[in-house]
Amino acid sequence: MFILFFWFCDNNDNKMEQNKRVQRVQLMSSEGEVITIDREVANRFERLKELLGANDFLYFPNTRSIILRKLLTWSFYHKYDPGPRNDDDSTSWYTEFFDVDQGTLLELIETACFLDLPKLLNKAQGL
């Protein structure tokens, strides 16, 4: 009886691991790079959540990998934000985040507009 119970727990662990795999989504950049993220992260972007629906793959034909990675960086930084940050650490973070050439900044603004990220748009347009 003890062996059966142990097997059942092991099988349950496998099911939990399978569920974790299902909750991952892949974003493909225009260069063909695939970035795999948790669905929970993708769901932080309301527009991305709508575009994905029940799918686990989304192709961005006009968005480079660096832009997708920047958006994910933004998402992680603002994960628990109730509102705008005003401290010195934020200022240095934003300075580093937006330390890109004009072309990259424009792409970032266009993608933020497409994905409906008003906080990012406001910050980027205020530069």
Image (spheres, grey):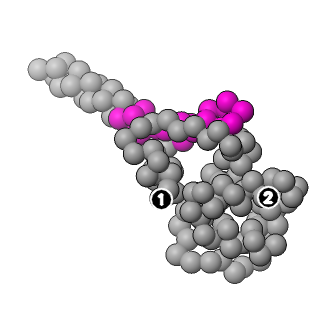
- How far apart in space, not on screen, are marks 1 and 2 (Cα)? 22 Å
Residue 57 as seen in the image, left or right of residue 96: left
The tag earlier along the polypeptide, 1 or 2, is 1
Report the front residue among 9 and 17.
17
Vertical position of residue 99 compared to residue 68: above or below: below
Amino acid type of the residue tagged 2 in the rendering? Leu
Instruction: Quickly name the residue at label 2.
Output: 105
* Quarter of the image where the C terminus is located: bottom right
Vertical position of residue 51 compared to residue 24: above or below: below
Residue 114's label in the rendered image is none
| Span highlighted in magenta in the image | 19-37
Residue occupying the point 72% across, 79% down: 87
Vertical position of residue 123 compared to residue 12: above or below: below
Residue 118 as seen in the image, left or right of residue 124: left
Image coordinates of residue 105 in percent, x first then y, are: 79, 58
Image coordinates of residue 97 in percent, x first then y, are: 77, 60
